[in-house]
Image: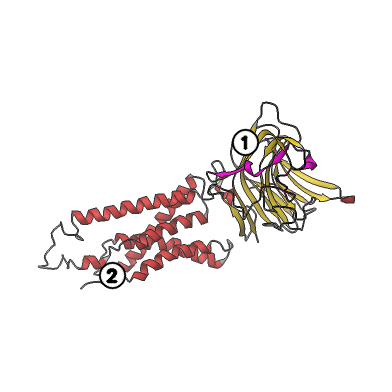
Amino acid sequence: MSTAPPRPWTGLALAASGWVALAATQLPAANPLRVAVVTAFLLIGPGTAAVRLAAPKLDRRDRKAARLECVVLTLAVSLAIGTLVAEVFYLTRSLSTVRAVSALAALTTVLALAPYAGPGRRARRGAPDAPGAPRPPEHLPGTSGRAGRTARTGRAALAGCLLVSAAACGGQSASAPAGVDPAATEPAAAGPWHLVFQDGFQGSTLDSSRWTTCYDWNDAGCTNAGNHELEWYLPSQVTVGGGMLSLNALRSATTGSDGKTYPWTSGMVSTGRDSWYATPRHTFAHGYFAAAIRIPAADGMFPAFWLMPDTRSTPPELDVAEFAGTTQHVQMTVHWAGPGGKDQHLAGSYGPADFPSGFHVFALDWESDSLTWYIDGVSRFRTTGHVPDVPMELLLDLAVGYPVAPPDTVSSAAMKVDWVRVWQH
């Protein structure tokens, strides 16, 4: 008796299941719906698509045994594929739930929509084991001969190639840089968390919907006169390529719109305004702020990852990571207004460490009653005093000449940023 091939919507439903699971990863980590949808897909989706495509020969004389065998095989294949994908990401130091589900969703889609080779095709051969039933010649398509083995081998090879390529492609997006613990790419503080802002700097241009290249007082460039810095910030010193943001300092005399000549030009980005009267792009009040950064090794540079109020002035101010006069110790600071508006601050420091040798994840958990700084997922400084409660803009910059000027032997430097993310409760 022939067996009808599955309805077309079966493959479409399988293909869609992965993308539904991927959408569910945008829910908070402890959300029951996220856990249920993602777990169901990981256990069923990839294995069902692969088993459906491979169409293994099962003992159909005992339907219950065949069904149980199919379920076990599906679960085993799903776990095997999931483990392989996880290992690829782990070995490339880019493991995260979103990336793993993305790769598995892509693979499941391809397998589910591939031409079906299931029992319907075999049924047309008749039942070779029945007495007197003729066996088809080995050269006929769809038989168990050389052609059938070649077709199935080709499908297996294709599936393997798709798995590797999907995992590799997923690893290029918002991946953890070499040397960074993959766990540090997610909030180290207790959640639940909801991702509200991110940039993995893909493509070749800065996303102007997320970033501007100056302070709120931008006027054909800008600087931080309060620190007597030596740079004039210009958009030309901000580049994107290879999945990274680069803030480039160059020893080049530049006349600013304030009429002064600055010996250096450099780059910065901010989620703030294009000009004084414009509207900030993104502001944040509380949250978990993280970025994977590699600072330059050159002396005289002042790389920083920080937040300032959308009122265009400080204090208050939150410095997630600053390197003033050193590349071996990172400063973590909260600023507030003291008597008469005078700046006061409390700072922590971590080091020594060879920060220029690789990327590190610098993060701040800004709660309503506490501030906790993390470096590569490890808590390094915490305070419960003077916690600000105002909307702030996010900034990354490579200032020059604070607290001391670079030596004459230094003519350029670059601060690299692999990704930036902000989560909130």
Q: What stretch is highlighted in magenta?
A: 213-241
| Mark 2 neighbour class, 10 Å CA radius: few under 14, some 14 to 19, many 20 or more | few
Q: Can residue 121 be seen in this view?
A: yes
Residue 265 in the image, given as x and y percentages of width and height: 68, 38
Residue 396 in the image, given as x and y percentages of width and height: 67, 46
Residue 221 in the image, given as x and y percentages of width and height: 70, 44
Q: 364 or 158: nearer the eye? A: 158
Residue sitting at 70 percent across and 27 percent down? 407
Mark 2, secondary structure of its residue: loop
Q: Can residue 87 be seen in this view?
A: no
- Whether 235 is among the magenta residues is yes
- Whether 295 is among the magenta residues is no
Residue 53 in the image, given as x and y percentages of width and height: 32, 61
Indicate the amino acid at tag 1: Pro
Along the polypeptide, which appears first: circle 2 or circle 1? Answer: 2
Disc assigned to residue 189: none
- Which residue is tagged 2? 5
- Which residue is tagged 1? 356
- Is 407 located above or below residue 266 in the figure? above
Mark 1, secondary structure of its residue: helix
Q: How many marks?
A: 2
